[in-house]
Amino acid sequence: MRKLQDSQPLWHALIWIGIYIVAVNVGDVVGGVLHFPGATSIVLLILSAVLLVYLRRTRRLAFYGVRRVQPGTLPATAFFIPLFVTAFVSYGKGWAPGLDTETVVFAILLVAGVGFVEELVFRGFLLRALRAEGRLTWAIVVSGVTFGVGHVVNLLRGYSLPEQPVQIVLAILVGIALAYGVVLTGSILPGAVFHALFNLSGTLTSDSVWGETVVAGIIAAVMIPYIFFLRSRLAAVGPAPDPPVASDGSR
């Protein structure tokens, strides 16, 4: 995989995306067989640890955005305030029935794993691979669209067909905004925190067609102008600087 990082970065990204999808489905199957709803969260936390060890050994943590936000870059993103506002919109629908401590704990663990892994594979591996092609806006849009379309796999997790188009469109918008944020700040970490909070709000709140429609409309109304704002800021200030290259050629 180390050689693939350098020689075929796009394939490197796609392989890790495939590993992530397989891990989620393995966790779901094992959880169903063992009647243990926390299985997927544990699988994803293990995958997160594996990814961190892998990137540490290959000296690519910073290269893929696992680093602090670069100094002075947060104002260009409006401090991610529009994104984080949308992470709490779903709570307006009210709490989901039947919540207990175990459900909440495993929900938190699950969204933490999903948030980190998805940000790393989509806004770390994939976005970095696409940026190597030299067309930054294209890379941002394609990574966001890929992230959104990838949510079609949720049909395997019990989502209904009517829910999918709305979820895909919103995921594309959020994915594009997050990609702009990574390019501007040089870090995937704010996006990982937002991602976890956003997914948690959807997990812990009630599910209704009307409520989901209203929430989707609000999120879209925030995301569309925010994306254009981020695009203008990127044109004005440029991307965050890349991390320094190590003596052996790694980053």
Image: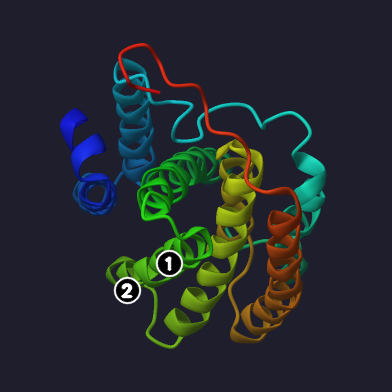
Label 1 – label 2 distance at C-alpha: 22 Å
Camera-nearest residue between 136 and 141: 136
| Label located before the other in sequence (1 or 2) | 1
Q: Quadrant of the C terminus?
A: top left
Residue 140 picture location, percent across and down: 51, 61
Query: Pointer 2: what residue?
Result: 155
Disc 1 residue type (three-letter): Val
Q: What residue appears at the point 52 percent right and 26 percent down from the top-left corner?
A: 243
Q: Residue at x 58, y 47 (%)?
A: 183
Residue 103 lies, in percent from the top left, at 51, 46
The image quarter in which residue 198 lies: bottom right
Q: What amino acid type is highlighted by mark number 2?
A: Leu
Q: Quadrant of residue 185?
A: top right
196 on left or right of 7:
right
Q: Is residue 120 left or right of residue 203?
A: left
On screen, residue 151 above or below 16: below
